[in-house]
């Protein structure tokens, strides 16, 4: 599943997050990379203990909890605390081909999550920088992603992906990982399609129609069968 979620953050929320992190403490992005990824990673990130980053993180997490499409697509069991990065054109920041680590340890030491889904939330308008496309490869080829500020892209963490060099301006994003209650990507896709169909039918026919009730029951029984505890 490769899914764009439009307007996860409103323009006002984007401005608020940017105001916070623009004044934050930035460090070498390789601090949070695995051994292999660090060889390909050239960017900067907000420090994990930065107070401005913590406030910005809360805004993103609240928006995720309120977005129906994200919840339906990800079926989140746990969300890694969102991080913030920037790729600057003056130094041609980029991140070469890599696959995200399967396990991410929580920064507070409370445990770890399995990375089923990866997410990038764009915080710079696409016209403010050149390059910087997120390129995600799957069985259908390579997909270039460069979304509007406030939009999010969700994709399987198993995907080979990269960030192309930024040649002008700054590409600023939030990124994080999700452990889903449904581990298998194909099963999550089926559930997302079914949920969308049920919502559409309910709008046309009403929530209490027998067909809608029956399909809703099928949906929840599939979740029950496929979901991990």
Image (tube, rainbow, N blue to C red):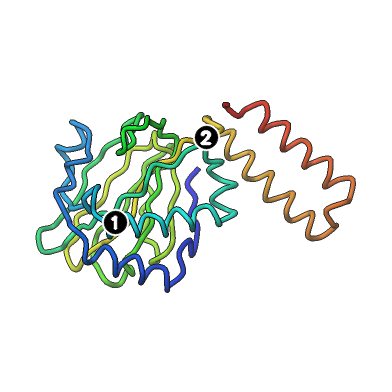
The residue closer to the viewer here, 180 or 65, is: 65
Q: Point out the residue furthest to the left here.
A: 91
Q: Residue at x 49, y 53 (%)?
A: 64
- Determine whether the residue tagged by mark 1 lies in a helix, strand or loop: helix
Q: Residue at x 78, y 60 (%)?
A: 203
| Picture coordinates of residue 208, whole percent (x, y) | 87, 51
Q: Quadrant of residue 147?
A: bottom left
Looking at the picture, does residue 176 appear above or below residue 20?
Answer: above
Q: CA distance from mark 1 to mark 2?
A: 31 Å
| Picture coordinates of residue 216, whole percent (x, y) | 77, 42
How crowded is the residue under tag 1: few (<14 C-alpha within 10 Å), some, or many (20+)?
A: many
Q: Residue at x 62, y 27 (%)?
A: 226
Pick whichever of labels 1 and 2 is earlier in the sequence.
1
**Mark linked to residue 195:** none
| Picture coordinates of residue 150, whole percent (x, y) | 42, 64
| Picture coordinates of residue 145, whole percent (x, y) | 37, 55
Q: Which residue is mark 1?
A: 53
Task: Give the side of residue 211 with respect to residue 59, left or right.
Answer: right
Looking at the picture, does residue 203 appear above or below residue 110?
Answer: below
Q: Quick one: quadrant of the C terminus?
A: top right
Q: Point out the residue furthest to the right here.
A: 210
- Determine whether the residue tagged by mark 2 lies in a helix, strand or loop: helix
Q: Residue at x 34, y 64 (%)?
A: 123
Q: Quadrant of residue 178?
A: top left
Looking at the picture, does residue 223 appear above or below residue 202?
Answer: above
Task: Give the side of residue 47 with respect to residue 137, left or right.
Answer: left
Q: How many marks?
A: 2
Q: Which residue is mark 2?
A: 185
């Amino acid at each position: 599943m490769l899914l764009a979620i439009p307007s996860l953050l409103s323009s006002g929320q984007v401005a608020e997050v940017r105001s916070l992190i623009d004044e934050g403490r930035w460090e070498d992005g390789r601090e949070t990379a695995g051994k292999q990824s660090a060889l390909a990673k050239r960017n900067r990130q907000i420090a994990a203990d930065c107070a401005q980053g913590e406030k910005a993180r809360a805004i993103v997490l609240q928006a995720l909890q309120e977005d129906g499409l994200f919840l339906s697509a990800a079926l989140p069991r746990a969300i890694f605390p969102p991080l913030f990065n920037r790729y600057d054109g003056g130094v041609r920041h980029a991140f070469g081909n890599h696959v995200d680590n399967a396990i991410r340890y929580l920064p507070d030491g409370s445990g770890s999550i399995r990375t089923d889904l990866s997410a990038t939330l764009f915080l710079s308008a696409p016209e403010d920088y050149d390059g910087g496309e997120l390129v995600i490869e799957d069985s259908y080829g390579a997909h270039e992603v460069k979304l509007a500020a406030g939009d999010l892209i969700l994709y399987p963490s198993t995907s080979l992906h990269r960030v192309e060099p930024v040649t002008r301006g700054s590409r600023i994003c939030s990124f994080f990982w999700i452990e889903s209650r449904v581990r298998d990507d194909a099963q999550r896709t089926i559930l997302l399609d079914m949920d969308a169909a049920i919502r559409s039918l309910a709008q046309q026919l009403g929530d209490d129609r027998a067909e809608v009730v029956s399909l809703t029951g099928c949906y929840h029984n599939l979740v029950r069968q496929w979901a991990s505890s």
